[in-house]
Amino acid sequence: ETGVTQSPTHLIKTRGQQVTLRCSSQSGHNTVSWYQQALGQGPQFIFQYYREEENGRGNFPPRFSGLQFPNYSSELNVNALELDDSALYLCASSFGGPDSYEQYFGPGTRLTVT
Amino acid sequence: EDKVVQSPLSLVVHEGDTVTLNCSYEVTNFRSLLWYKQEKKAPTFLFMLTSSGIEKKSGRLSSILDKKELFSILNITATQTGDSAIYLCAVTNPNTGNQFYFGTGTSLTVIP
């Protein structure tokens, strides 16, 4: 157990809808990264937040957005869902800022878009 | 473009066997290479490597990095059924928010 929690565990949405996924970081961790892991693939970096500001973004469209709160918990929002958004969404927290190499992953949210 | 390639994609071995998993990478600015084990959902951290030629060891698992040839290997000796998992390799690039670039993973199945 890493101390990183995510909610919900599973989610089913229909195409075109919007979804919000939540992540609670391990205590003291000020950096959170979000990843999308499609079936049979490695995690793909979506973006990272450090002290409530976006600090790096992968190759994902603007309909993927995020927030980090003062208590360092975080949200991932996806608008206009597409079938290809079906995946396991992982958040990972770390301490020591963006230079920290050791990330602690949460159990993920399995999103299914029908 | 930064990328990580792992091989083999999948592997089935018997308990007691020794396995070697491979990870090769291309990254514009290398900081570190990490190995993770993913059993069901959350990847769990195994090793971080930054320097060539220095072996990291934890029990039956060990790993080494070759920065000249741009690859790393993960060895597991005396495999057990509990080693069955997907093993992920990632590299970090400080120029891009220190994002992790993951490979597709190697699926290891250990049969009794």
Image: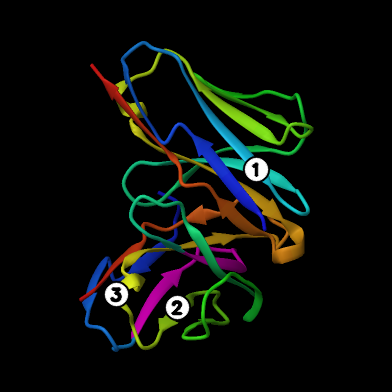
Residue B107 is situated, as x and y percent measured from the top left of the image, at 37, 36
- Rendered image quadrant of residue A3: bottom left
Same chain for the residues at labels 2 and 3, yes or no? yes
Circle 1 chain: B
Instruction: Determine if marks 3 and 1 fall on one subunit.
Output: no
Sequence-earlier tag: 2 or 3: 2
Q: Secondary structure at mark 1?
A: strand
Residue at image coords 40%, 82%? A78
Instruction: Identify which amino acid the numbered label 1 is placed on.
Output: Tyr
Residue A101 appearing in the image: no
| Drawn side of residue B5 relative to residue B32, left or right | left
Predominant SS of the magenta segment: strand
Q: Which residue is mark 1?
A: B25
User: Under tag 2, what secondary structure?
Assistant: strand
Q: CA distance from mark 2 to mark 3?
A: 17 Å
For label 1, the crowd category at 10 Å Cα-Cα, with few meaning under 14, some 14 to 19 and many 20 or more, is many
Residue type for callout 2: Leu
Which of the pair A27/A59 is nearer the observer?
A59
Q: Secondary structure at mark 3?
A: helix
Name the disc covering residue A83, or none. Answer: 3
Q: Quadrant of the N terminus of chain B?
A: bottom right
- Asked if the residues shown at circle 3 and circle 1 are in contact, with their CB atoms under 8 angstroms apart, the answer is no
Q: Marks 3/1: CA distance?
A: 30 Å
User: Label 3 is found on which chain of the structure?
Assistant: A
Give left or right: position of B107 versus A58. left
Q: Nearer the viewer, mark 2 or mark 3?
A: 3
Of all chains, the one bearing label 2 is A
Mark 2 highlights which residue?
A: A76
Q: Is residue A97 left or right of residue B20?
A: right
Q: Residues within 10 Å of mark 3 (few under 14, many from 20)?
A: few
Name the residue: 46% across, 51% down. Answer: A42
Mark 2 or mark 1, whichever is nearer to me = 1
